[in-house]
Image (tube, helix red, strand yellow):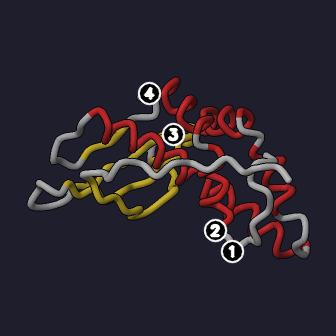
Amino acid sequence: MRAMALEHAPEPSPFRVTLFVGPQPVKGNPFTSSCVFNVKKRSWKGGVQVAVDITQSQLDRLSTDVDFARWVTLALADLADADRVFQQERAHELFIQAVCWCKLNLALQSGITQENQCLAADTWIAEVRETVIKRTNFITLYIAAELDLVPRDATTL
């Protein structure tokens, strides 16, 4: 039996982050999506909203990097055709959310100000790629949980 690599729990974050909305298209940028997160730092009196933008070409590259299409195909193989189409669309939305969350975490680690802001699509491209590749197992487990999929061997991606 192959041992499953476990991701260690991160240090407690000074931020509380929740997804507010997304992914949604960015007005004026037809091939860009955005997720908006509510961010509250423990020392702040109030929270802020951070929009995280990502282009379709970035998503396509990241999806290829982690072989996401293959994972989705395997994860949804047991579903009926009608259910599979809906779940595939939802899995891609969740992938965008997860990628945006990775990008937001980079901003939080580097420090953000207490003001509403947008992380532009051209921010931290290489770092986001590196983070997504490192956190592939976490991302697929997140998507599987959101889709209520029966866990499979998460290491076979």
Given the image, on which type of amino acid does mark 4 rest?
Trp
Instruction: Check residue 54 in the rendering and tell me which mark sits there, or answer none.
Output: 3
Contact flag, marks 2 and 1 (Cβ < 8 Å): yes
Contact between marks 4 and 2 (CB within 8 A): the answer is: no
- Label 2: how many Cα within 10 Å (few below 14, some 14–19, many 20+): few
Distance of label 2 from label 1 (alpha carbons): 5 Å
Q: Which residue occupies the foreground of this view, 97 or 120?
A: 97
Q: Which residue is mark 4?
A: 124
Q: Could you tell me which secondary element the residue under label 1 belongs to?
A: loop
Provide the secondary structure element on which disc 4 rests. loop
**Residue 145 tag number:** 2
For badge 1, the amino acid type reads: Asp
The CA span between labels 3 and 1 is 26 Å
Of labels 4 and 2, earlier in sequence is: 4
Along the polypeptide, which appears first: circle 3 or circle 4? Answer: 3
Q: Is residue 110 left or right of residue 157?
A: left
Name the amino acid type tagged 2: Ala
User: Quadrant of residue 21 in the image?
Assistant: bottom left
Please give the residue where the numbered disc 1 appears in the rendered image. Answer: 148
Mark 2 vs mark 3: in front: 2
* Front: mark 4 or 2: 2
Under tag 2, what secondary structure? helix
